[in-house]
Image (spheres, rainbow, N blue to C red):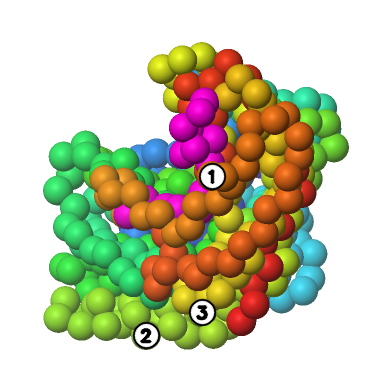
Amino acid sequence: MKFLMVLSAAAGMLSAGDIVLQSGPYKVHYDESAFYCSAQYFYDGTEIGGRKGFYGSILSTTGPNKFIGAGHKEGGCEKLLSVSIRADGIGRKVGNRLYTGKELQLEKVSMLGNLKMTVRHTITPEQIVIRKHYEALDDQPIYSFYIYQFCWSNQNDLWMAGRPDGSTLDGKFNSDEGWFLCRKHHEPELLWFAQYNSNAGKGIIGFFGKYFKTQGSYMFWDRKIYHKFYFSARTPKPAKKGYKSPEYVMILKGFSAAKTDWQKKVKTETAALLEKYPLPLPPAVQTPELGRDLTVQGKGKGKFCCVKIPLDLMPNQNCTLSFRIAKGVNTSTKATDTQVLIGQYDRGRKKFQLIRSFATRIPRDGQFHEVADNFRTPGEIIEPFIYVYNINSDDIVRVQNVKIIRKD
């Protein structure tokens, strides 16, 4: 029988249908009606995430707002397969009650459409670790996929975020329905974020414990009811049957600090997390899948056509790019219309930085020609790509066997 407790959500009391895990200063509520997604977060007695929105993973299937997951049912209904709880290594019966211990785990397995999603929350006095991965049991259309979303409190008035290169940005919430990060700042890569409640002197850090290049996009939604964080994964669209996602890992860490010192505190905590969960080094040799055999079909005179191949580069490194290319006889006579280049936009996506161009002197004979040349990466890596152009063309450009070798 469910416990019908005092429904004082703001005070952190147990609500009807809730599982609550508490370890040290952390207390997290999980809502049975939302398929045991997390629903409320407390740190050291302060509510840092409230019950005014949905947490969990949200899949949009065939278009915008066709969501499945937690309380969303516009695109279908999440189906819970299993939920389990362990307290200090011992399996516990699942019930609507409070669980305490030095290490608490809640694991749930559910279906979002044809995607089998496994989620594990581990709560200790030091931090909260959330691990997620999924497998496509059948082909699944994907319009967007929010792996993480947190309805952080509207009492959190300041924010900060850190990039993999060590640089940071910060701002103030206005509760005006605006957006930060991806939609406002065109932010391509984040390693961590933080929000701070200056009245309570408490805050929360979210750190990607298994960060990988071009993993997705990030947003703060600055609403009156919450200051929500979204992470939308860059994932195959559609996800073919048998596809297995990488494991996504989010580390949540609360902190206490005076308003004058909160950013310093965040930088200290994230530096310690980076030592514990270091960034992966890009492989010394890269052979992008898209560059194994790429055909770029021209769209005719006056038409622009370009295909981008994402890269994982390090700053200030000497590298070699090699590939083979065939330009059709009816491609443009202008050399730069069928070039291959490496470049990136600045953070505001207003200025393009050319790193190196290739293949401008390759003849238009329909035959493959080998290309290999050196380049040096810039001091700041934002979001670099290989660009394969085929402009003003009625023919094709083919590129094969793309390989990048880092020499340093």
Q: Which residue is mark 2?
A: 268
Q: Position of residue 295 (x, y in %)?
A: 69, 30
Q: Is residue 371 visible?
A: yes
Q: Which residue is mark 1?
A: 360
Start-end of magenta stretch: 332-346
Question: Which one is nearer the viewer's eye here, 248 or 104?
Answer: 248
Q: Which residue is mark 3?
A: 274
What is the tally of numbered marks visible in this picture?
3
For numbered disc 3, what is the local secondary structure? helix
Q: CA distance from mark 3 to mark 1?
A: 42 Å
Which residue is located at x 27 percent, y 83 percent? 264
* 300 part of magenta stretch: no
For numbered disc 1, what is the local secondary structure? loop
Question: Which one is nearer the viewer's eye here, 28 or 60?
Answer: 60
Give left or right: position of 343 versus 347: right
The kind of residue tagged 1 is Thr
Q: Is residue 243 above or below residue 191?
A: above
